Amino acid sequence: MDLLTPPPDLYGRPRADRFLRGLTAIQDRYVQALGGPLLRRSPRRPLSRPTPPLRLVVAARRELAADVIELSLTGPSGGQLPPWQPGAHLRLVLPSGRERHYSLSGDPADRRSYRIAVRKLPEGGGGSVEIHDTLHPGARLTARSPRNGFAFCAEPTVLLLAGGIGVTPLLPMAREAQRHGLDWRLVHVGRSADTLPYADELRALDPHRVVLRTDDEHGGVPTGAELLAHAPRGAAVYCCGPAPMLAAVQRALDESPACALHFERFGAAPITDGKPFAVRLGTDGPILEVPADRSALDVLREARPDLPYSCHQGFCGTCEVRLRSGTPDHRDRRLTAEQRAAGALLPCVSRAAEGETLVLDV
Ligand code: FES
């Protein structure tokens, strides 16, 4: 058994932390110091039983940046909401039935409201457009209690790297770091200043610890080395942004002064070691070819655009379909052995061997 390689996390990502065990010890001490029932639970451990849906109301809405709005969500009677920690996200069920995950950007100390920020993506799957177009103060929706797959371990020295709207989980981390007197920096990158949400709120924490870096002023997107040059020696890096930014930071990590990387990705994880296979819609439906570089979900949605999805990363379960026959290569981190044996499959990440045909009930 390889005892030195950390296990994959909730999202099925390999943990890049080279000193994971040391960090875990730091986290344990931090958690003990803060106390509280939620903090004593490992944020990456799934809850053992389902919690009832939360009913929420849009209490306020404001424009944060170009094509970005912020929603403040409260309970219908204004009571206390379930607690959360920096890095947590909320799984919202929109009026259309779409489910989407949004990082919480507010202050965990505020137990009466949740804040989320949403960038409108006209070419996306429709969730952000629905939120922008239909969710105004007074609108009602449901959600699952906050979950955390991107926990903040409060290491003594921290670099937070945010790409655009990826600042949302990092803002509460910066607030937490400031509150606990940690040595922290935050670099927020984007196309131009008007696309960067929460710039004022970040500067208000400590203007000397925040760098806003825009492509229009610097002649293009930053390299991973440029971003990691902001890391003090031994810093733990938390990165949230688009896939190319994460890939650049991962590539540059070994040559940087940083010692650990925690990250959260937007959208689908890259397909590794994908082989072409096929999916069939029912026993006598059409056969669709899944190329090596595309997910079965993408291909299925061309034939069935109403097929629901949310995370694209195999952890939310929204895209679940039934497998009638064929041998799948399950790549999710959600389904139990029993669920898989009963025919559940998550086509956003799961695949099959080359030449295999999976017959699905969709
Ligand atoms: S979309 Fe979340 S598990 Fe497939």
Image (spheres, rainbow, N blue to C red):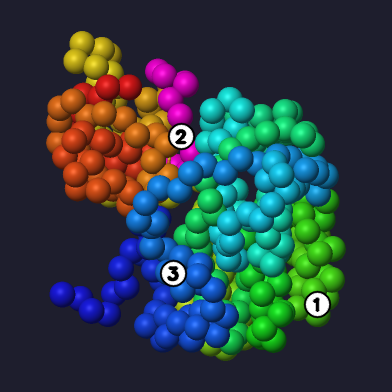
- As measured in the structure, the alpha-carbon distance from the residue carrying label 2 to the one carrying label 3 is 28 Å
Q: Secondary structure at mark 3?
A: loop
In the displayed structure, 48 sits above or below 71; it is below
Tell whether 308 sits left or right of 114.
left
Q: Position of residue 286 (x, y in %)?
A: 27, 14
**Is label 2 within 8 A of ligand 1 (CB to nearest ligand atom)?**
yes
Tell whether 37 sits left or right of 195.
left
Sequence-first tag of 2 and 3: 3
**213, 349: nearer the viewer:** 349
Tell me what residue is drawn at x 42 percent, y 80 percent. Answer: 24
Identify the amino acid type marked 2: Tyr
Q: Quadrant of the C terminus?
A: top left
- Label 1 vs label 3, nearer the camera: 3
Q: Which residue is mark 2?
A: 309
- As measured in the structure, the alpha-carbon distance from the residue carrying label 1 to the one carrying label 3 is 31 Å
Q: Is residue 219 visible?
A: no
Q: Secondary structure at mark 1?
A: loop
- Residue span colored magenta: 303-312
Q: Which residue is mark 3?
A: 41
In the displayed structure, 224 sits above or below 243; it is below
Q: Quadrant of residue 137?
A: top right
- Label 2 vs label 3, nearer the camera: 3
Name the main secondary structure of what is drawn in magenta: loop
In the displayed structure, 360 sits above or below 196; it is above
User: What crowding class fits label 2: few (fewer than 14 Cα within 10 Å), some (14-19), or many (20 or more)?
Assistant: many
Q: Position of residue 186 (x, y in %)?
A: 69, 72
Identify the amino acid type marked 1: Asp
The reply to whether discs 1 and 3 touch (Cβ–Cβ < 8 Å) is no
- As measured in the structure, the alpha-carbon distance from the residue carrying label 1 to the one carrying label 2 is 39 Å
Q: Is residue 45 visible?
A: yes
Identify the amino acid type marked 3: Arg
